[in-house]
Image (cartoon, helix red, strand yellow):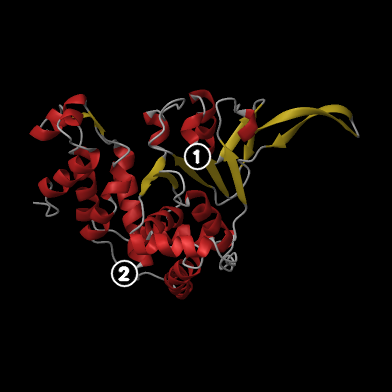
Amino acid sequence: MKTKTSTESRTVKQLVEGYQQIKTELGKTIVGQSEVIEQILISLFAGGHCLITGAPGLAKTLLVKSISHILKLEFSRVQFTPDLMPADITGTEVLSETAKGRQLTFVPGPVFANMLLADEINRTPPKTQAALLEAMQEHQVTAAGKRHPLPEPFFVLATQNPIEMEGTYPLPEAQLDRFMFNVVIDYLPEDDEVEVVRQTTAEPTKPGKPLFSAATMIRFIRLVRKMPVAEDITRYAVRLAAASRPHQDGSLEYVNEWVNWGAGLRAAQFLVLGAKARALLLGNTHVTVEDVQALSQPVLRHRILVNYRAEAEGITTEKVIEHLLESISPVIK
């Protein structure tokens, strides 16, 4: 970054060193899952929200709590259930006695935190899911016509279980699009599972030490925004997202055949923003094509909807993204 001030240079150094320290501290409680940790941290340093998909027992909740503790952020957790109401998340007005007599007073809900863990978000009806939309997009809550700003920084990390679909309410596309990444947590290799069992059946391990503060995270997020990116890289991200849309002028044949709905403009925005964060965290001075490609799966997998024909042929969204990376050339002619 040629125009960096000395203050920005120090912040970059603090960010790069801090990223390594965070991974070290997380390693005290979380075994393996290095790619998952990297993707979640990239989304946080880019100021985005993250959807975490994985089977039960894969430490999704523990991972989020550990990250909030290490980043020294105010943490709040909501267990989403079918009877959860919007006011249970955002807060509500209650009648209370004041010096001026009885008045309606706003009581903030659990969304008023730096990091909100929306546990099993697909177990609550769309009305309650939608209560998070304003908070995620505008970083505020509106109650009784009054706007209440949320603390900064503000992140939503939502988990969902992909294997138990009975009694769940799949997130609508508008809600999914607010999440920067959809991070998939899979089972660990055998040696890592042995280590997890060993740790969890012995004396509890101490959590990692706090490293940053909310104010420091805000500085990091602003720094990511200042990271320069070449027009060719931005154009590549736009072309990659646009190529996933079926039945457009010049649409790829396999996209028309397999895809019901493609990625919108937010996908390109998040590809570039995530690539900026990734480049900075790795200590690079510029964004590369590899940064965009490395984040194509978490950015696009919840924005591309395959059709029944693709499912019948065993074609997953991940396969479509792999085909897109092969088809779209990063060289802009």
Q: Which mark is residue 41?
A: none
State the quadrant of the N terminus.
bottom left
Type of the residue with mark 2: Thr
The residue pinned by badge 2 equals: 285
Which structural element holds mark 2?
Answer: loop
What is the x, y in percent for residue 280? 36, 65
How far apart in space, not on screen, are marks 2 and 1 (Cα)? 30 Å
Residue at image point 11% right, 51% down: 329
Q: Which mark is residue 136?
A: 1
Q: Is residue 317 above or below residue 62?
A: above
Question: Looking at the image, which is closer to me, 51 or 102?
Answer: 51
Question: In the picture provided, is 120 more to the left or to the right than 1?
Answer: right
Question: Looking at the image, which is closer to me, 53 or 17?
Answer: 53
How busy is the neighbourhood of tag 2: few (under 14 within 10 Å), some, or many (20 plus)? some
Type of the residue with mark 1: Met
How busy is the neighbourhood of tag 1: few (under 14 within 10 Å), some, or many (20 plus)? many
Residue 231 showing in the rendered view: yes
Q: Earlier in the sequence, mark 2 or mark 1?
A: 1
Indicate the quadrant where residue 55 lies. top left
Question: In the picture provided, is 206 more to the left or to the right than 21?
Answer: right
Residue at image point 14% right, 33% down: 255
Which structural element holds mark 1?
Answer: helix
Residue at image point 31% right, 52% down: 272
